[in-house]
Image: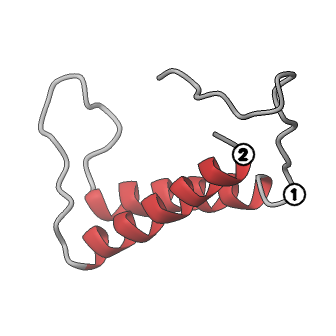
Amino acid sequence: MSADNIREEIRASLRRLRRLGDEGRVVMAEDSWNTEWHDSRVAVEIATAALELADAAMLWMHTLPHPDGGYPPIPD
């Protein structure tokens, strides 16, 4: 796993979230713990803005190889 791979995952997530939002398929859970996120349109806008910011922040990141010369998997 490299920073570039993670950035590609972020960009893919951004595309998928935009598509779901554009299709009107995102709704917010009505839960007593959800005290801030009631409007799905606003939540999607904020989430996409955060993903765009992460994408931009990672644009110039490079990943140094592991001391053994490879890129070992990063555990979840």
- Name the colouring of the figure: secondary structure
Residue in view at x 85 percent, y 48 percent: 62
Residue in view at x 29 percent, y 70 percent: 21
Q: Secondary structure at mark 2?
A: helix
The answer to which image quadrant residue 65 occupies is top right
The disc at residue 72 is none
Q: Secondary structure at mark 1?
A: loop
The answer to which image quadrant residue 41 occupies is bottom left
Residue in view at x 67 percent, y 59 percent: 55
Residue in view at x 32 percent, y 75 percent: 19
Count of residue discs = 2
Residue 17 horizontal/vertical position (percent): 36, 63
In the rendered view of the protein, which quadrant contains the N terminus?
A: top right
Residue nearest the viewer, comparing 41 with 15: 15
Q: Residues within 10 Å of mark 1 (few under 14, many from 20)?
A: few
Residue nearest the viewer, comparing 44 with 75: 75
| Name of the residue lying farthest toward the left | 30
| Name of the residue lying farthest toward the bottom | 22
On screen, residue 68 above or below 22: above
Labels 1 & 2 near each other (Cβ < 8 A): no
Q: Give, as a three-letter code, the residue at label 1.
A: Trp
Disc 2: which residue: 3
Q: Give, as a three-letter code, the residue at label 2.
A: Ala
Q: Residues within 10 Å of mark 2 (few under 14, many from 20)?
A: some
Q: CA distance from mark 1 to mark 2?
A: 9 Å
Residue 73 horizontal/vertical position (percent): 58, 29
Disc 1: which residue: 60
Residue 11 horizontal/vertical position (percent): 55, 63
